[in-house]
Amino acid sequence: STGLTHVDNEGKASMVNVGRKAISERTAEATATVKVGREVADLIADNNIKKGDVLTVAQLAGILAAKRTWELVPLCHNITLALVDVRARLDQSASAVVLTSCVTCVNQTGVEMEALTAVTVAALTVYDMCKAVSRDMVISDIRLLSKTGGTRGDYYSQLHKNPNS
């Protein structure tokens, strides 16, 4: 084995058996950025994108995506989510949409992939809704900010303030 959790002794992909893991509260937070350019940012600010309210639709797309992560990422478990909070904020000075997610569950496996999927699909939604105006947008900085719970302990990225320190 390579030490990877999703690989069997023969090196083939394998879903982890979480059946004997302890149930605990687990959370994960993630972020992504869509650099949209000045023209698109102004249209979003004025709610003048023809497809509709970009920030609200991106938020809803992120929530839906988190709930469907297990269908999109082959080795993810289908888990019950207690909370999916997705925020979409226009940073007009940077001509960017900043997306954040916070996902919580009480389960035997974590929700990092759900948090990351939420912001990724929210970012794709921003792109889709604005591409008629400009295709010169950049989706970037998709990253896990934090995760809590589980046997591996808590994780806080350098971009995220650890509330315990």
Image (tube, rainbow, N blue to C red):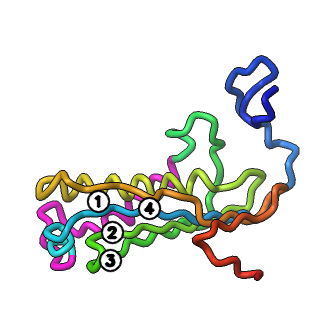
For the residues labelled 4 and 2, the Cα–Cα distance comes to 8 Å
Q: Nearer the viewer, residue 19 or 62?
A: 62
Residue at coordinates 64% horizontally, 56% vertically from top-left?
111
Chain-order first, disc 3 or disc 4: 4
Q: Position of residue 2 (x, y in %)?
A: 78, 29
Q: Residue at x 72, y 33 (%)?
A: 6
Disc on the earlier residue, 4 or 1: 4
The CA distance from mark 4 to mark 1 is 11 Å
Question: Looking at the image, is mark 1 or mark 3 earlier in the sequence?
Answer: 3
Of the two numbered discs 1 and 3 in the rendering, the one whose residue sits closer to the viewer = 3
Choose top left, top right, bottom left or bottom right for residue 89. bottom left
Q: How much space separates mark 3 and mark 4, taking CA atoms? A: 13 Å
Q: Which mark is residue 91?
A: 3
Residue receiving disc 4: 32
Which amino acid is tagged 4?
Ala
Q: Taking 5 as reference, is 130 above or below it? A: below
**SS for dot 1:** helix
Above or below, 66 relative to 45: above
